[in-house]
Image (cartoon, coloured by chain):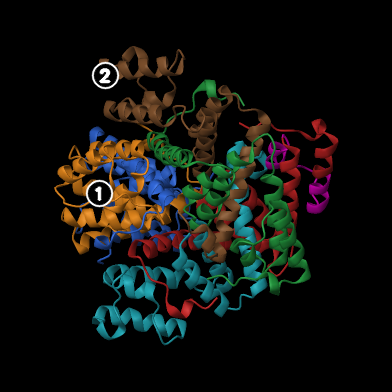
Chain colours: A red, B cyan, C orange, D blue, E brown, F green
Amino acid sequence: MAALIEEGDASAEVAIVYADIKATRGVDWINNFWKAIAVHPATLKRLWDNVKQVMAPGALDPLTKEMVYVAVSITNNCPYCIASHTASARAKGMTDEQFAELRAVVGLANETNRIAIGYGVPVDDRFQTP
Amino acid sequence: MAALIEEGDASAEVAIVYADIKATRGVDWINNFWKAIAVHPATLKRLWDNVKQVMAPGALDPLTKEMVYVAVSITNNCPYCIASHTASARAKGMTDEQFAELRAVVGLANETNRIAIGYGVPVDDRFQTP
Amino acid sequence: MAALIEEGDASAEVAIVYADIKATRGVDWINNFWKAIAVHPATLKRLWDNVKQVMAPGALDPLTKEMVYVAVSITNNCPYCIASHTASARAKGMTDEQFAELRAVVGLANETNRIAIGYGVPVDDRFQTP
Amino acid sequence: MAALIEEGDASAEVAIVYADIKATRGVDWINNFWKAIAVHPATLKRLWDNVKQVMAPGALDPLTKEMVYVAVSITNNCPYCIASHTASARAKGMTDEQFAELRAVVGLANETNRIAIGYGVPVDDRFQTP
Amino acid sequence: MAALIEEGDASAEVAIVYADIKATRGVDWINNFWKAIAVHPATLKRLWDNVKQVMAPGALDPLTKEMVYVAVSITNNCPYCIASHTASARAKGMTDEQFAELRAVVGLANETNRIAIGYGVPVDDRFQTP
Amino acid sequence: MAALIEEGDASAEVAIVYADIKATRGVDWINNFWKAIAVHPATLKRLWDNVKQVMAPGALDPLTKEMVYVAVSITNNCPYCIASHTASARAKGMTDEQFAELRAVVGLANETNRIAIGYGVPVDDRFQTP
């Protein structure tokens, strides 16, 4: 079980990141992922900078990004990641029906991935254009 | 390399599925995935029925579903699946910028999945509610 | 692309393993897997000893073992392993229909694995007995 | 933790599937996998139809199919799936010795998969025939 | 949960391996991995022989080998393996800072692996030399 | 196949990163990974900043970091990543013997990971301390 750096125990370097997480997300608490990696402040800052940049609204909306995150996390079997990004997706509006459909797509993609691999299907010429 | 059942060589059983694929998708050709699994008509029919049901418009729109499919296929490293579902996503309107953001989310999710696992992060109580 | 140690270039240490592979399998050639790892004779000997022990007839028959090997190789997306163990399974009697059913099971298992993970299904008490 | 739809709380749509599961398998209870996915009846029906078709006796006997399912589930690290399909395999006659050999094959295949990938072994011409 | 063969219950065949594990490692106890696989003595002996050979000091020092083991175990999401090989790495001198950097490399490699796959990056000619 | 942004076609934003890659690494060319992701300059800059930070000399030496990268890339089956990081490791001094031992550890770790999972080995109390 990870050691967790609580807000009250944070160094100045860690506290700055914690404050930015709370301000950026508009929340008043820090979830365990950040408290665990705070044992290595360089990793905390690096990953938060990445998440802040990649998950910001862009050509894809934040909910779509969270659902993609959940899809990857299910495929990789990361319970923490499934729990935290499902919570984020729900907070951004994901409904029960959408979540059920998301998991159905993830399941089926995992099946047909192995069918394509198992049959050694060659890529169609029409799909080769970049 | 997979044996491929071309349309001209399809049995009646296979031809019915091929016709439904073309009609449902509004296309005039069959991509190699279906031609490869057509060597086993029960698998062809089963998987087509699944794809038709799961990928139909629902609570999630078809483009989001295709992007989730691409995300899983990248995570699993299935080149055929990446090529075919990227083509489908582009046909449904995915832009270059959206594709770039999608791959950024997939990449980062794969990183933080292993960070969460590597640190043994415990699930926050607030995330436990189903 | 791997460097391959051909039979004519094998050291005495490698030649002994090559001879045992041919004698054990009743074949007159060495497939590329062994020629590649022969650059490190300790690995060649170690892995051949493992394969010889694990794949020998036992409580499971050799064909079942080869089909399990193919199932794992498809799940891991190892084209060399799929090709070589499919050839071995065919040599031991696997029919086209059996191969098609094998791939269907592998595909479906990959789907339901992610469904179980994505829904966080708790293990039933009845399944807990060792 | 998944919400579970108990038999007494099942809608008519769900109850029909539950009844078919019990009748097809000759059991008097429903395991948690089905109770979890019953929150989305379309997924429940779809996956049960798939499992019923794919796992039925065919060119491969049901025990072989269950053991392949276990092999995939171990490779993917799905504890629920390992527990439930191991129970099914035992119910179909898998002995302790067979289970031990199965896990040995799965382990070794996972090793040699990475050795083949790590050495970049080219597929032998003799293995190229479809 | 695995059945565990305690030292007091070990057959002669198992006891010999247990004694060799303790002597080779200079420890006075057996960790659960070995106690679990001891239900199948051939697997116990085979895997111990492999671990003893592969993890011995060689061109790579034992600490580097343990850290590679941890990297693979995190990538595969095996909590037991992470716990046991992290303990071994710490016993061989891994510091907190080294462990943090190790996990950062593992995380980033998992990200860029999917970026390379997702962009379909062709291997540079300069990297093709074996 | 990825579109590649050659140095002569790089925008000012991309050229700055290319120049930093060459200066930091002391090389006079850009490998395809960066040319592929340069289609999305924000991703190019983000990933280069990450690689520069994570792979810099620290508590772990650069060669160990490269070998860990190779280990993850083999486990994930990413041929581009194996090729590029093997070249980097060789440039930093990895010998043939070290590379062979590295792949042996990766292979064995992948095996014992699945054995631990397949047997459901419980984590020893002694390994629980953080």
**Tag 1, which secondary structure?**
helix
Q: Does residue A37 belong to the magenta stretch?
A: yes
Residue at the spot of label 1: C7
Q: Amino acid at mark 1?
A: Glu
Q: Position of residue B40 (x, y in %)?
A: 26, 69
Single out the mark in the foreground, 1 or 2.
1
**Quadrant into which the N terminus of chain D falls:** top right
Of the pair C33 and F89, the residue shown nearer to us: F89
**Does F31 sit above or below residue C71?**
below
Residue at the spot of label 2: E13
Q: Residue at x 35, y 45 (%)?
A: C37
Q: Does residue A57 belong to the magenta stretch?
A: no
State the image quarter where residue A97 is shown. bottom right
Q: Residue at x 15, y 56 (%)?
A: C93
Q: Position of residue C20 (x, y in %)?
A: 19, 40
Of the pair E118 and D91, the residue shown nearer to us: E118
Q: Is residue D75 left or right of residue D91?
A: right
Q: Residues within 10 Å of mark 1 (few under 14, many from 20)?
A: some
Q: Position of residue E126 (x, y in %)?
A: 54, 60
Prevalent SS, magenta region: helix
Q: Is residue D119 left or right of residue D58?
A: right
Which residue range is magenta in the image?
A: A19-39
Of the pair E66 and D105, the residue shown nearer to us: E66
Task: Assess whether mark 2 and mark 1 are in contact (beta carbons under 8 angstroms).
Answer: no
* Chain label for disc 2: E
**Does B34 sit above or below residue E64?**
below
Estimate the spatial distance between the alpha carbons at disc 1 and disc 2, rounded to whole Å.
38 Å
**Does C80 sit above or below residue F53?**
below
Q: Amino acid at mark 2?
A: Glu
